[in-house]
Amino acid sequence: DAGITQSPRHKVTETGTPVTLRCHQTENHRYMYWYRQDPGHGLRLIHYSYGVKDTDKGEVSDGYSVSRSKTEDFLLTLESATSSQTSVYFCAISESVGQGFFGYGYTFGSGTRLTVV
Amino acid sequence: SQQGEEDPQALSIQEGENATMNCSYKTSINNLQWYRQNSGRGLVHLILIRSNEREKHSGRLRVTLDTSKKSSSLLITASRAADTASYFCATGGEGSNYKLTFGKGTLLTVNP
């Protein structure tokens, strides 16, 4: 997807190990998000960021942490991976809400398929 | 918890037919959006409708919004095999329109 890349695309890791997923954007958008997608649950928000060093929790944040030291990068860390964190992880970006009272659509990355064994 | 719930969960139609998907939500919204996801890919934004709008068109897509019923519908006219995908509605809440809550999606299959 233009302007946003996720890495790695696939990863297999062992239970108890830390894992970091990376999201990189070239759009200079203020807002960045991490979602997980699971069968039967749709997409659920893990964490989001509204600026450098400004982050907040979503609905399924337990076991995850994030960091944003630069506008273009948003990192998601699984502190100690568990099998329940096996999922497809999507990063998304959107423009600043200040420019549009009614909000903007998201641009999604291609996803990271994470398997915890 | 899910804000939007799509209906039906799965829909199978023939090429050329129209496809209608519905979305219901629970709390007041600022905007409602529809996304498409092809198998193994990320979601693609289709259309955004504001809470003060009732209908919006984009090419073969028509979206309606009824805030009194807390529901929306997505109509795809003259469907094509390439429209086969999952479709998700997402809502932006009042005061937090930058943060979307997604439904579980409708899987649309268009048979040639």
Image (cartoon, coloured by chain):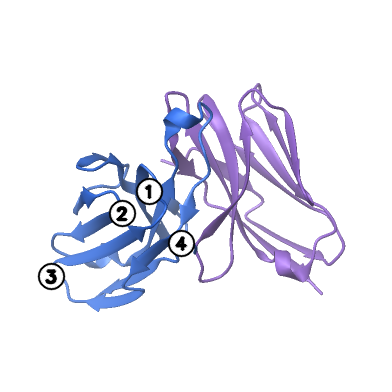
Chain colours: A blue, B purple
- Name the residue rendered at 34%, 76% in the picture: A10
Q: CA distance from mark 4 to mark 3?
A: 24 Å
Q: Which residue is mark 4?
A: A39
Which one is in front, B14 or A8? A8
* Tag 2 and tag 3, C-beta contact below 8 Å: no
The quarter of the image holding the C terminus of chain A is: bottom left
Q: Which mark is in front, 4 or 3?
A: 3
First in sequence, mark 4 or 3: give its number. 3
Give residue A54's position: percent from left, percent from top. 23, 39
Task: Provide the chain ID for the residue under circle 1.
Answer: A
**Residue type, numbered disc 3:** Thr
Q: Evaluate if marks 4 and 3 touch, with contact meaning CB atoms under 8 Å apart.
A: no
User: Residue under circle 1?
Assistant: A28
Which label's residue is closer to the chain start, 1 or 4?
Answer: 1
- Do residues under tags 2 and 1 come within 8 Å of each other at their CB atoms? yes
Q: CA distance from mark 2 to mark 1?
A: 6 Å
Q: Residue A17's mark?
A: 3
Tell me the amino acid under the disc marked 4. Answer: Pro
Earlier in the chain: of badge 2 and badge 1, it is 1
Whether callout 4 and callout 2 share a subunit is answered: yes
Disc 2: which residue? A72
What amino acid type is highlighted by mark number 1? Asn
Give the spatial CA distance, label 4 vs label 2: 30 Å
